[in-house]
Amino acid sequence: MSDVIGIHHVAIAVPDIELAHRFYVDILGFEDAKIGGWEAGNEWIDNIVGLKNSAGRSFMCRAPNCYIEVFQYTSPPPAPQDPKRPVNEYGYTHFGMQVKDIAKVYERLLEAGLTFHVAPDRMVTNEKGERVGFSATYGRDFFGNVFEIMEIREGADIRPL
């Protein structure tokens, strides 16, 4: 039996905390849970994050079934982010959100200025032309970080939340 209870949160570093807050809280509708930050010289945090003389701002927000923690590091200065980073590079590639109505969510996110790799209506069949029981697409936040929206229908071989 595993000692792991579940995934509590996923964290992401961004170059603009206000714009990230707009995406996660204002656009996606996640609930603010904690806002904070730390000044350089906090050895306890430096040891946790593995950086010397780190400083930053952060917030945590609550999605229906987990938390997202967002950081804007002000020290040390991070390397520039590639907003078109390929999803096949090693490391975390995206986080996925199950939605009730993918077309509605997709249109709302497009109107808010987010971009997607493909419209979700093109994803309802597999390469054999068979219905797959779900629709999904990858989008990019304001910084190029990848997220997925997915609508799972009855009969899909993916377990819904």
Image (cartoon, grey):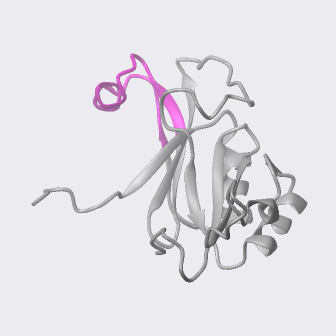
Q: Residue at x 46, y 60 (%)?
A: 67
Does residue 74 lie above or below 5 as drawn?
above
Q: Could you say which is closer to the camera, residue 6 or residue 1?
A: 1
Does residue 157 lie above or below 88 as drawn?
below
| Apparent side of residue 156 relative to residue 3 in the rendered image (left or right) | right
Which quadrant, please, contains the N terminus?
bottom left
Residue at the front extreme of this rendering: 128
Q: Position of residue 31 (x, y in %)?
A: 57, 69
Q: Residue at x 46, y 75 (%)?
A: 161
Q: Which residues are magenta?
A: 37-57
| Apparent side of residue 48 relative to residue 156 in the rendered image (left or right) | left
Q: Position of residue 2 (x, y in %)?
A: 14, 57
| Apparent side of residue 69 relative to residue 21 in the rendered image (left or right) | left
Q: Could you say which is closer to the camera, residue 39 or residue 148?
A: 148
Instruction: Quadrant for residue 7, please give it.
Output: bottom left
Instruction: Quadrant for residue 96, please give it.
Output: bottom right
Q: Position of residue 142 (x, y in %)?
A: 76, 43
Residue at the bottom extreme of this rendering: 154
Q: Position of residue 16 (x, y in %)?
A: 70, 38
Q: Is residue 55 magenta?
A: yes
